[in-house]
Amino acid sequence: MATKYDVIIVGAGPAGLMAAKTAGENGLKVALIERKEIITDINRACSMMVVTLTGKYLDGQRPPGARLTLFDRFVRYITPEAAAPTAAYIELARSHGLDPAQMALAYVNSRPFLSANIIGATTMEQLAANIASIDLDLSPEVLEGIEAIHRRQPNPCP
């Protein structure tokens, strides 16, 4: 069984160290993780950036004004290794009548070790959809589908 933490801080820079110190001093169980460290439970929730699950980057597409078109620091999420699992997650969501990004956020929300789900959006419509994911309960079939895809490619975006 995975260790449960009250706070998970990614990055051991000055702000991360201060946050960990403060949380620990207040009686919280803290995990301080280097950015490149691989931890299975966190990878399941975070290894596929939600932004790619819209499908708009598949087949080499780069829509104008989209985050991965504007910023090259996210290129690891659109590699050939990431394309197959991304397409599989999108297909899983759509086959169950779900928005792929909402499915991903709902999965993150369902993880018992998570205290907060940090969302991001480019448009108000995306923000509304992201917030609405809090009310989405994934069926056992969807959860098993997510796990099956994860088992095939547990770290598609190293």
Image (spheres, helix red, strand yellow):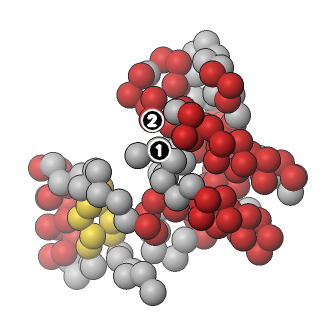
- Visible residue check, residue 45: no
Q: Secondary structure at mark 2?
A: helix
As rendered, which of 128 and 142 lies closer to the eye?
142
Question: In the rendered view, would you say 105 is above or below 123?
Answer: below
* Residue at 66% over, 59% down: 149
* Residue at 56% over, 34% down: 80
Residue 56 image point, x, y percent: 69, 28
Residue 76 circle label: 2
Q: Which residue is mark 1?
A: 157
Amino acid bearing label 1: Cys
Amino acid bearing label 2: Arg
As rendered, which of 11 and 57 lies closer to the eye?
57
Question: In the rendered view, would you say 97 is above or below 54?
Answer: below
Residue 144 image point, x, y percent: 72, 70
97 to the left or right of 117: right
**Circles 1 and 2: CB atoms closer than 8 Å:** yes
Question: In the rendered view, would you say 49 is above or below 30?
Answer: above
As rendered, which of 153 and 40 lies closer to the eye?
153
* Residue at 14% over, 58% down: 18
